[in-house]
Image (cartoon, grey):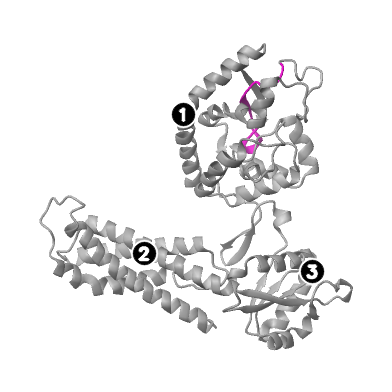
Amino acid sequence: MIPSRSQLLAGCFFLSDLLVTATAWLGAYFLRFDSGWLPLYKPAVDFHLCWRTLPLVLLLCSVAYRLAGQYQVHRLRRFREEVVAVLKGTSLLTLLVLATLFLLHDPYESRGTLFLFAVLTVTGILLGRRVAWSLVRYLRSHGFNQNFAVIVGTGRVARKTARALRHASWMGIKNVGFVEERSDRWTSDLDVLGRFGDLPAIIDKYRVRHVFIALPLSRYDDARRVFDVLSQSLVEVRLVADVPNLAGLSMTTTNLDGLPVLGLRESPHFGLNVVVKRAMDIVLSLAALFLLSPVFLVIAAAIKLTSRGPVFFWQERCGLNGKTFHMLKFRSMRTDAEIQSGAVWAAKDDPRRTWLGTFLRRTSLDELPQLINVLKGDMSLVGPRPERPVFIQKFARTIPSYMARHRVKAGITGWAQVNGWRGNTSLRKRIQYDLYYITHWTPWLDLRILWLTVFRGFVHKNAY
């Protein structure tokens, strides 16, 4: 059963989309033929033809938008899912309009106008959705349009679920308490409302609409019991799977001939995504090398004048799929730095550094030559920082999911670095942020990290 409020919101979205589509159809005609902003190589089409085809466009849009899933309204839907649905709906609509006009031999046929129509439609619908959802989320975060939920379980997963619901107050789902069967797991700091058998009464008493089953994998039988108890209730039941620590990366769901399959170690870095990321690396690294070439010359001259030895320093690191490569840096230590000590991490007031090297490491200027590694394809601009093979052998044995960070190219900067986890800081926290980056990667996240690097990533107190 679809809640009446969701039906009302979906209906408002549908009417809004119809209005935006009609406005975009007429606006595209104005921009193409009446505005004078675009050159005309043929006589302008009569406006009557545009107006005459408007009912057909609205009919087709009602079909296309529905097929694209633009009106699947629920509280856990993310805005990026909304964006994908709108792009699919508008693309399908444009193709349907083009095909229909061609089949009907309609004289109103202009590829330029259809392109403008598609752009205006996408922009208008997304702006409308953004405003509408912002208003809805504001009202929900202030106590309006609230739904109530209970969480089954009292362990780590249940507590994390409760914190997530409090943090995402914009969803308008408020946790009223916990349900637990085992009395030895009842704790005084949690509002335990009862046992599994009490769920129907709890749902009626608190007008609960959502039940989150947050039990560990070892209690699978208990989860089945809860689902059986709820079989006669009209609540939405969701299973909070306790698998992220087991997986190392995010969990995905697919369908194998009707059988649901959970993906525990999958990465978004495949197919066209790899091409997009590589293109960004080439363009941006070339631009950076060109703009920073005077800085390279100044640093190289300063190294030569202040210490004996080469300007650059090559060091073996591990990158994509654990493959080793030689990472390039400006030399910041004496040439005999590791002859006696061997491979060790740099420490505070490290005596192996040159006085110029101290400045270069603190400001991360010693990392600039890695732009050449990016251009060669050994590294990416953004990704987990590469580590030396000798350290990786140790970390892989002591830190869970450490090797998962090698499923993507290493980077000059990363999500961990712009959040302060670099240098002499918690390695486990750094891995946590690296895995978050791998899981949630998009080109926009890369651009955001590069932007934050300019303001946060160069100077750091823990960079020795």
Disc nearest the viewer among 3 and 2: 2
Question: The residue under label 2 is which amino acid type?
Answer: Gly
Q: Is residue 217 left or right of residue 452?
A: right
Residue 291 is marked as: 1
- Point 64% across, 32% down: residue: 323
Neighbour tally class for label 3: few under 14, some 14-19, many 20 plus, Cα within 10 Å: few
For the C terminus, the image quarter is: top right
Image spot of residue 327 (x, y percent): 62, 27
Which comes sooner in the sequence, label 1 or label 2? 2
What residue is shown with label 2?
Answer: 124
Observer able to see residue 99: no
Verify whether residue 321 appears in magenta. yes
Q: Secondary structure at mark 2?
A: helix
Image spot of residue 140 (x, y percent): 57, 74
Which one is nearer the viewer's eye here, 233 or 353?
353
- Decide: is 291 above or below 273: above
Q: Which residues are magenta?
A: 318-334
What residue is shown with label 3?
Answer: 219
